[in-house]
Image (cartoon, helix red, strand yellow):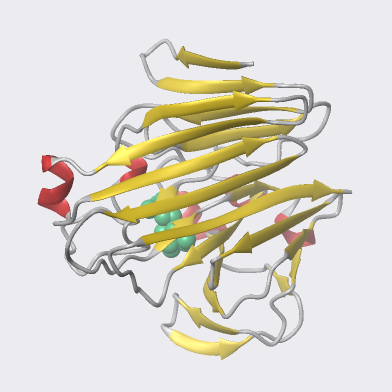
Amino acid sequence: MITCKAMANGFEYIEINNATATAKIALQGAHLFEYTRHNETPILWVSTCTAFENGAAIRGGIPVCWPWFGMSENPDLPQHGFARTSIWKLMEQTENAQASTIILELQSTKSTTKLWPFEFTLRLHVKVGTTLELSLETLNRDSKTMNITQALHTYFTIDTIQNVSIRGLEHKRYFNALDKTFYTQEGAITFDKETDRIYQDVTWPLKIDDSVRTISINASNSTSCVVWNPWIEKCARMSGMCKESYQSMVCLETTNALKPTFPPTHNEAGGSISSAR
Ligand code: TA6
């Protein structure tokens, strides 16, 4: 079943409840903030200290970072772009015995062109079943070439950060956003401090090994990925985070974060995540 709902403060979202899972997607940002397979621990992590109100991105779930990842050249513009705080429209919905699919859309407007001078249509395809599949589709409706960077900035629920390792990025080059230096990954990724890295030339799928389960993340048309945990100090400073949030989440983000290229045609970057014991 696919239902449009609103929270007590009017915050609108779409609720999907089918034979395999439940999911919730806010119209603001087409922000998927819940994906839980029945009788299992939620796959997506959402902070218990986040607000659900228009104008502020939900802390958790899958923020859509577009048309830039990170900071824009113009420091007055919002980090991770404007798509995640814009109101999208539900354009299509279909269901069958295996899954429910919705398509949300964001069109350029006078207010977006003030921030970023391009005509575009952005679509997010969401398929909810025993796996969760998202595909972010950019249509450049302008006459000019766009340079975009983008991310599906996914927060995953984990049991304890100290027991987590990420496999599949061994020997990959990465940019360490903390010291602005490139390194090569040795072995699986584990966490004992703030970690904020953009891995390049990624070969999917990747695995998040938690002490209680393994989450597999696959992607196509995504050349890079970000691995992030704020750890203690940054977590304490961040909006929407509780003091102990860093212990129960890790971000593994399917991105095109370093090499912006986009002619006036069509681009689709997507990914799917599944949880396997
Ligand atoms: O993807 C990692 C990152 O760029 C971190 O540096 C941190 O800023 C995180 O995104 C969250 O950003 P936000 O703008 O959602 O607070």
- On the image, the x and y values in percent for residue 175 come to 49, 81
Q: Where, quadrant-wise, is the N terminus in this rendering?
A: top right
Q: Quadrant of residue 100?
A: top right
Q: Nearer the viewer, residue 207 or 234?
A: 207
Classify 110 as above or below 136.
above
Q: Nearer the viewer, residue 272 or 157?
A: 272
- Compared across the picture, whether 230 is left or right of 115 comes to right
Q: Can residue 39 be seen from the camera position used here?
A: yes
Task: Identify which residue is drawn at 45% across, 76% down.
Answer: 178
* Quarter of the image where ligand 1 sits: bottom left
**Residue closest to the eye, 64 or 239:** 64
* Residue 77 shown left or right of residue 29 in the figure: left
Residue closest to the far top? 8
> On the rendered structure, is 120 left or right of 182?
left
Q: How many labels sit on residues? A: 0
Residue 221: x and y, percent?
54, 66
Vertical relation: 277 (above or below) 36: below
Q: Residue drawn at (67%, 75%), measured in percent from left and top?
A: 203
Who's the residue at 51% across and 22% down the image?
14
Q: Position of residue 195 (x, y in %)?
A: 56, 69
**Residue at the far right in the pictured view:** 277
| Displayed quadrant of residue 86 | top left
> Residue 69 location in percent, x, y?
37, 62
Q: Nearer the viewer, residue 117 or 64?
A: 117
Q: Residue 49, can we see it? A: no
